[in-house]
Amino acid sequence: MPSPHCPNCKKPVAPRKENPAFPFCSARCRTLDLGRWLGEEYRMPVRQAEEEEDERPGHAPGRDDFGET
Ligand SMILES: [Zn+2]
């Protein structure tokens, strides 16, 4: 079985028995990956809220100029 690679930085990972951060190469990468997952979870509702605001009509006061010409 080939040695696994860190999902975060793609470096070779030490075997589980000598690597408490397995399957990551280090505790730092494990924390970074976990933080990325949490970050995406927190970011999703924010992104949806932004899209809803974009779809809201009547927020462009400059449109009247286009209608006259
Ligand atoms: Zn890593």
Image (cartoon, rainbow, N blue to C red):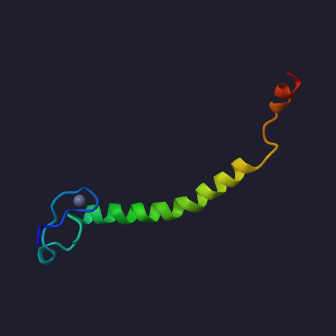
Q: Is residue 57 left or right of residue 50?
A: right
For ligand 1, give the image quadrant.
Answer: bottom left
Q: Position of residue 20 (x, y in %)?
A: 20, 74
Q: Quadrant of residue 11?
A: bottom left
Q: Position of residue 2 (x, y in %)?
A: 11, 68
Q: Position of residue 33 (x, y in %)?
A: 34, 63
Q: Locate the N terminus by quadrant.
A: bottom left
Residue located 79% across and 46% down the image: 57
Q: Locate the C terminus by quadrant.
A: top right
Q: Is residue 17 left or right of residue 34?
A: left
Looking at the image, the residue that sits furthest to the right is 68
Looking at the image, the residue that sits furthest to the bottom is 17
Q: Position of residue 4 (x, y in %)?
A: 17, 67
34 lies above or below 59: below
Residue located 88% across and 24% down the image: 68
Toward the viewer: 42 or 51?
Answer: 51
Toward the viewer: 50 or 35?
Answer: 50
Q: Quadrant of residue 63?
A: top right
Q: How many marks?
A: 0
Toward the viewer: 56 or 40?
Answer: 56
Q: Is residue 44 left or right of residue 38?
A: right
Q: Is residue 12 left or right of residue 54?
A: left
